[in-house]
């Protein structure tokens, strides 16, 4: 009888904790998106927002768009089209609809991260220029990837297909992240665990080479509008990506390998940070792949031995400060 009472109390407290966590997540997301005046701080709008608003207006007027057929439908990002149509229909101010997407994005990211890292620490670390630009500006990518994280949380269940398919039809880059995940799982099963993180870096090198010389062939073949994208957008400097590569090396050398979830989060983070560096070397834009992974990178750092973790978090905060200084200096110029 006493055991049953204790079980009920434990369940009740667990439910209360979950409700408080959700309230905290929603409060943080609201503060991040609606309270901090990012446009006033920047002195300008986020670069992609104007494009989103123009397309919403175009679709709202019922003007024609390209039709997709066959396999090209997988790369059509149809769901984002209908999200844009919905924003045009239900929001007089299109920006309010886009902010709602940002709010959902940061809420999903926070739900995944707050349960694994100190909430105060991660709340500070997420407010970094690269992540701000992702969540507030690159909305398709910023909502697609956390939906994949939801699918990861639900792994092994049929319902996990819902967020995964949703992500695919919002941003076709979801295929890349899903492929990386399954390759890392294959490496984990087939090779010694000690080599997993090193192999993640090797995978990143092949990815960067493929992005430079092979991806356009596939995109053109399936009729994707993203073909020749790398020739349009400028690559990030090697010096800017070098710190992330060094952090990947620290994780390779010092991160634990005992826990299954830790291994997949760390190996994915290593792959994305290494890809950013190798992409910069090949002259391919790779910054957004680190941007979407910043919550996972923070979690990975938290898995390190205590003295390494503390030193890297301090370095991360200093780097964050320098990023803001550089970001705002560019705006003033």
Image: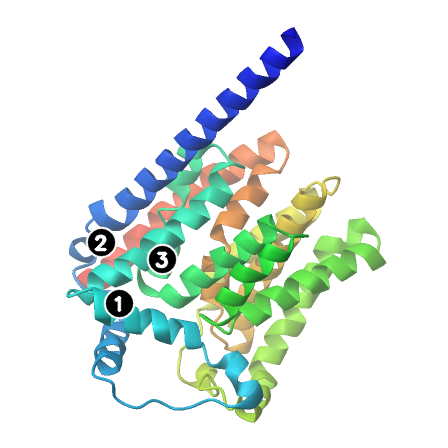
Q: CA distance from mark 3 to mark 2?
A: 11 Å
Q: Residues within 10 Å of mark 1 (few under 14, many from 20)?
A: many
Which of 271/219 is in front? 219
Instruction: Note whether residue 48 is visible.
Output: no
Q: Secondary structure at mark 2?
A: helix
| Quadrant location of the C terminus in the rendered image | bottom left
Report the residue at 57% width, 78% height from top: 211
User: How far apart in space, not on screen, are marks 1 and 2 (Cα)?
Assistant: 21 Å
* Cα distance between the residues tagged 3 and 1: 17 Å
**Residue drawn where x is 60% and y is 12% of the image:** 6
- The picture places residue 285, in percent across and down from the top left corner, at 47, 73
Q: Quadrant of the N terminus?
A: top right
Q: Which mark is residue 38?
A: 2
Query: Which mark is on residue 135?
Result: 3
Q: Is the residue 24 above or below the residue 232 in the image?
A: above
Badge nearest the viewer, 3 or 2: 3
For label 2, the crowd category at 10 Å Cα-Cα, with few meaning under 14, some 14 to 19 and many 20 or more, is some
Query: Is residue 318 visible in the rendered structure shown here?
Result: yes
Q: Are marks 3 and 2 in contact (CB under 8 Å)?
A: no
52 over 225 or under it: above or below: above
Question: Quick one: label 1 or label 2, which is nearer the N terminus?
Answer: 2
User: On the rendered structure, is 204 left or right of 123?
Assistant: right
Q: Are marks 1 and 2 in contact (CB under 8 Å)?
A: no
From the image, tell me which residue sits under label 1.
87
Left or right: 36 with respect to 218?
left
Residue pictured at 36% horizontal, 34% vertical:
24
């Amino acid at each position: 009888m006493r055991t049953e009472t204790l079980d009920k109390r434990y369940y009740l407290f667990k439910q209360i904790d979950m409700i408080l966590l959700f309230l905290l997540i929603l409060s943080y997301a609201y503060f991040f998106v609606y309270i901090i005046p990012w446009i006033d701080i920047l002195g300008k709008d986020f670069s992609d927002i104007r494009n989103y608003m123009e397309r919403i207006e175009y679709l709202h007027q019922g003007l024609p768009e390209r039709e997709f057929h066959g396999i090209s439908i997988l790369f059509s990002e149809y769901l984002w089209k209908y999200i844009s149509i919905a924003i045009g229909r239900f929001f007089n101010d299109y920006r309010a609809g886009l902010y709602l997407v940002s709010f959902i994005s940061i809420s999903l990211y926070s739900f995944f991260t707050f349960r694994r890292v100190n909430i105060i620490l991660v709340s500070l670390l997420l407010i970094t220029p690269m992540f701000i630009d992702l969540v507030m500006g690159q909305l398709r990518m910023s909502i697609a990837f956390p939906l994949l994280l939801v699918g990861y949380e639900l792994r092994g269940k049929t319902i996990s297909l819902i967020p995964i398919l949703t992500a695919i039809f919002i941003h076709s880059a979801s295929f890349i992240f899903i492929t990386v995940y399954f390759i890392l799982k294959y490496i984990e099963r087939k090779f010694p665990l000690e080599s997993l993180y090193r192999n993640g870096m090797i995978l990143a090198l092949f990815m960067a080479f493929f992005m430079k010389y092979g991806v356009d062939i596939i995109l053109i073949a399936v009729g994707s509008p993203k073909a020749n994208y790398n020739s349009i957008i400028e690559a990030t400097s090697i010096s800017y990506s070098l710190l992330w590569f060094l952090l990947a090396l620290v994780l390779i050398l010092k991160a634990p390998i005992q826990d299954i979830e830790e291994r997949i989060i760390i190996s994915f983070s290593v792959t994305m940070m290494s890809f950013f560096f190798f992409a910069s070397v090949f002259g391919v834009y790779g910054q957004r792949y680190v941007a979407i992974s910043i919550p996972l990178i923070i979690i990975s750092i938290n898995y390190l031995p205590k003295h390494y973790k503390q030193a890297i978090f301090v370095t991360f905060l200093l780097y964050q400060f320098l990023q803001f200084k550089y970001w705002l200096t560019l705006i003033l110029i």
